[in-house]
Image: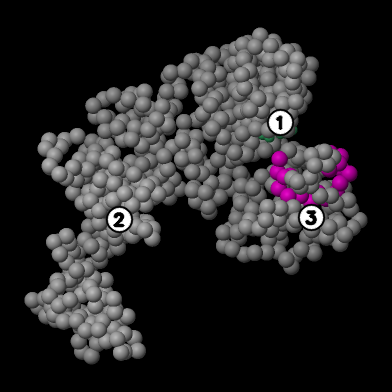
Amino acid sequence: MDSPRVEKDEARPTPSMPVRFLKGVGPARAAVFAQLGVNTVADLLEYFPRDWIFAPPSVKIDSLRPGQTASIIGMVESTDYQSFRRTPMFEAMLSDETGLCRIVWFHGGYLQKQLRPGQIIMASGKVTLYRHQLQMTNPKFLVLDEHHARADEFFSGGVYPATAALGSRRIKRIIRPLLDSLDCLVNELHDEDFLKKNRLVGRKDAFAWIHLPPDEKKLGLAKRRLKYDELFLMQLGLALRRFRMRHFADATPFRCTETTDRRIRRRFPFLLTEDQDGCIAEIVADMSASKPMNRLLQGDVGSGKTVVALYAALLAVANKTQVAIMAPTEILASQHFLSIERYLKGSDVKRALITGGLTGKKRTQLLDEISQGAVDIVVGTVALLEQDIEFQNLGLVVIDEQHKFGVEQRARIRKRTTPHCLVMTATPIPRTLAMTAFGDLDVSVIRRCPPGRGAVITRRVDRRDRPRAYDFIRERLRAKKQAYFVYPRISGLEQDSDVLAATDEWKNLSANVFPEFTVELLHGRMPSARKQQIMSDFRKGKIDVLVSTVVVEVGLDVPNATIMVVEEADRFGLAQLHQLRGRIGRGQSKSYCLLFAEAESEIAASRLEIMTRSSDGFEIAEHDLRLRGPGEMFSTRQHGLPDLKIANIIEDYELLLMARKHAFELVEKDPMLAEPDHKNIRRALLEKFGDSLGLADVA
Ligand code: ADP
Ligand code: MG
């Protein structure tokens, strides 16, 4: 830091200095700041205004024109409070060397204590003509003293997110002096050529202007620069994480010969789709390298991910290594196991399912076999497989995350650097998010489902059309098709509101709407055995209509069920609607998704509109992200990255792409950020990410 001489009693601020030591901040305000997430001077500089006001620069009184919005500076000649009026009014006469202007504030009684003749004030507001006299009504004003030498700045500038205990003006007053010390608080990250080429202003200017913008243009430039930096540092963190993964870890490179490929494909009773082949090619390329694969495989439920993962697993087995397949729940683990069993019937690949129910001797025996390499493929829950199971030679880990982004799991798996890793998710992750949350993973996507499936038609149904919809469903039921009716959890009401709603509706449907059919109820609060029974009956076709809460989301695969009715569909998010709809359209015949909705909010309406228009999970996810904003669906902090304070990955997508490109190029050139030119970048990165990316040992 370049502060050769420190003033005796007033320490120069440094980025890491606690705000408590700043002028105007005592322990009480420091506590309020802490609640706002502001602990240090650096935090304070990044406590950006949420809005900006541009007051006009001050002018002389004789140039005022009625209708204009203006600021004037002058001396208070006289004041008068007229409390007797219907609307009490405080009046002041203001003079400068060019003239006199009357200023009134309605209900201005409180001003008697603030404004006195002889004071110099600045007033900013609308100029009117009242009885042939110029007048300013209810202007904002400021009593000028030595602290407000630059009066114009008072009105212009940031409006900070404030609390009752700490107002925006106060925050502004605390930040203001820091702007004079930016030289020792802010370091430039990029050289001048780079900035010029990318139309970025200097980092110091950006901080000065974001807090105290001279004009709107400079404010825009400041925002752009700060957003860029934020995105750049985030992407740099990801790029480094990825680089380290690639270069500091070794994996077994697999060989995939034509014979192996043919033998694996023979296991599948169908030709793989183009998308599946594409993903497999990417996976094979990864696994042929001596660096561990870190790949995310995305595709809707039923798109054929399991088949792709099994291909990878068999390739690992062909290369004499073991495979762990992890699912989030035991049900899903056993489903995976069953489908693997189907494909591997008659094969001599040894596979085992490990469950929580497996105890005692049997368990010990299985663990022994695994550690001796006698089992090739082990399927189980993440929880089970992460316990101290020892593999003799683990070559591949497959993690099925189903409907969430399980970054935690990734983090833990990461530490075992040796095995290749394939993460599967049925949640379509929009491109924008994939680039941030999973920015260090490679991504493969299955977009189109395997052939041989009936189309799904989605319609929105409102109250008027209900009887017709029921008629239509009745007709399908008579043709021996089955239907789901799903009820939302109604937020804000008691916990079991969904159960109540579903129960009521079940009674209504079975008694009044579909009396001639078998209508059953399924919800999460039922005893497990009863649930199993109902699901099994539905699968066998003994039940025509299954009324349920959203529990139906997981695990039911009934090709003959071709109707999905979602009640109060406007209460569901897009992602959830898409998943629900994924329950149908599994057989050959046409399916129908009917979205019952009555309430009419704009967002709900556009959600339903998207559902009726699109069946592409990625398109839907992208819309979801736009409608809800990234905050709700995805918090960067949740993913071990610092939250974004000013950039928005959707609105600033172009900047994100640019920052990403630069960050990855930089790591390519100087992976240790060791060059002197990159010193400030490295420091900023460490300040931002701390240890969360394991960067400390890079530094
Ligand atoms: P996911 O794991 O993505 O949910 P699966 O791999 O379980 O999907 O496949 C869903 C269904 O589609 C399974 O019944 C599977 O047998 C079938 N399937 C997968 N790939 C193909 C294909 N290429 N052609 C025909 N059917 C396929
Ligand atoms: Mg599956």
Specify the amino acid type for callout 2: Ile
Magenta stretch? Answer: 534-554
State the SS at label 3.
helix
- Residue sticking out furthest to the right: 516
Image check: 325 left or right of 225?
Answer: right
- The residue wearing badge 1 is 330
Residue 96 locus on image (x, y percent): 11, 76
Specify the amino acid type for callout 1: Glu
Compared with residue 282, is residue 601 higher up or lower down, i.e. above or below? below
- The residue wearing badge 2 is 171
Image check: 318 left or right of 414?
Answer: right
Q: Nearer the viewer, residue 97 or 543?
A: 97
Labels 2 and 3: the sequence-earlier one: 2
Residue 267 locus on image (x, y percent): 73, 21
Specify the amino acid type for callout 3: Thr
- The residue wearing badge 3 is 503
Dot 1 alpha-carbon crowd within 10 angstroms: few under 14, some 14 to 19, many 20 or more: many
The answer to whether residue 211 of the structure is visible from this angle is: yes
